[in-house]
Image (spheres, grey):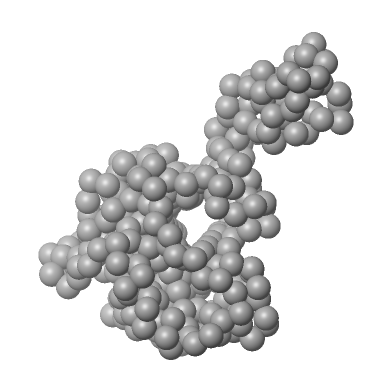
Amino acid sequence: MIDITLIGTAALMPSPDRALTTIFLSCGGHSILFDCGEGTQIAAIKAGVSLMKTDIIALTHYHGDHIFGLPGLLQTMRSIKRTEPLYITGPEGLQEKLEPILKLTGWVSFPIIMFALPADGLKLAELIDGWSVAAKLSAFKTEHRVPSQGYCFTLGRAGKFMPQKAKELGVPVNQWSILQKGQCVQLDGVIILPEQVLGEPRKGLKFVFTGDTALCDNLFTATKDADLMISEATYGEFEQAPHAIEHGRHMTFAQAAEVAKRANVKQLWLTHYSHMITDPKDYLPNATAIFENTLCGHDGMSTTLRFEN
């Protein structure tokens, strides 16, 4: 299963009820923080989320409202004497853009490892011990005023275990769980592969965060069949679509809903609201008229994505 919490939902500037856009994902004892705007630490505390053991920080781009929470968070991690490496990824220019951030942070007690995601994504077990072998993080290019990317987190699910097959191959019962986890077993010099005792792979889970972006073709491809899509929706009105392009390349509620509908996602959460939006629910009908299963995200909103059956 995958736990998702919206830490902050504001764009550009925070308000008393909204920290800047940040999302926290946890899965199997590990976690990813998507963006880290000003106020992230306070908003996380209010949401009941601890960021101290975050494994990966995935940045969508390098505008201040998405990264200015980093120095404080890194200093807090240092103050609790963290020693585990922290991995940070983002679009092109990562090292250059984070250099002043790290100077502000000062010395830390743990390694900070910056990396770029491969074009076809990365199985997180290859990066960090303990991640499920079925967990994968991918990035997709988006259209903003600066280099930007969204993220797709998937959790695969193996086929059903077939005990009879395992018995026929002579696999001891105490090693069945190894094969069920997708790992090989060696018996008298013979390697037994998981696929020899597992049925066809079952439907996994998919979570997508768009980051800041205008409407673009990549969104429809990257979000296809997602269980949950969290999308930027900076502007509430249909008529603000030209304004959304002119002022930074963003989307309206309706445009986010159009992506969700065409991509056949299960549920859409809206976030990254302009400071002009007092109550996002006032504009929600503009989205639900296109994609019914749309919710206005709010700080602290959370859900658990679970496998079917």
Q: Is residue 170 above or below residue 263?
A: above
Front-most of 8 and 281?
A: 8
Q: At which x and y percent is residue 279?
A: 38, 75
Residue at x 44%, y 65% (from the top left corner): 114
| Quadrant (top left/top right/bottom left/bottom right) for the C terminus | top right
Query: Left or right of 271: which side holds 44?
Result: right
Front-most of 91 and 38?
A: 91
Q: Is residue 93 above or below residue 159?
A: below
Residue at x 49%, y 87% (from the top left corner): 106
Q: At which x and y percent is residue 6?
A: 50, 67
Q: Is residue 173 above or below residue 267?
A: above
**Quadrant position of residue 89:** bottom left
Residue at x 40%, y 82% (from the top left corner): 101
Instruction: Decide if residue 18 is in sight here.
Output: no
Instruction: Decide if residue 151 is in sight here.
Output: yes
Query: Left or right of 196: which side holds 141?
Result: left
Q: At which x and y percent is residue 165?
A: 75, 14
- The outermost residue toward the front is 189
- The outermost residue toward the top is 168
| Number of on-image labels | 0
Q: At which x and y percent is residue 20?
A: 41, 77
Residue at x 52%, y 45% (from the top left corner): 123
Q: Is residue 280 above or below residue 179?
A: below
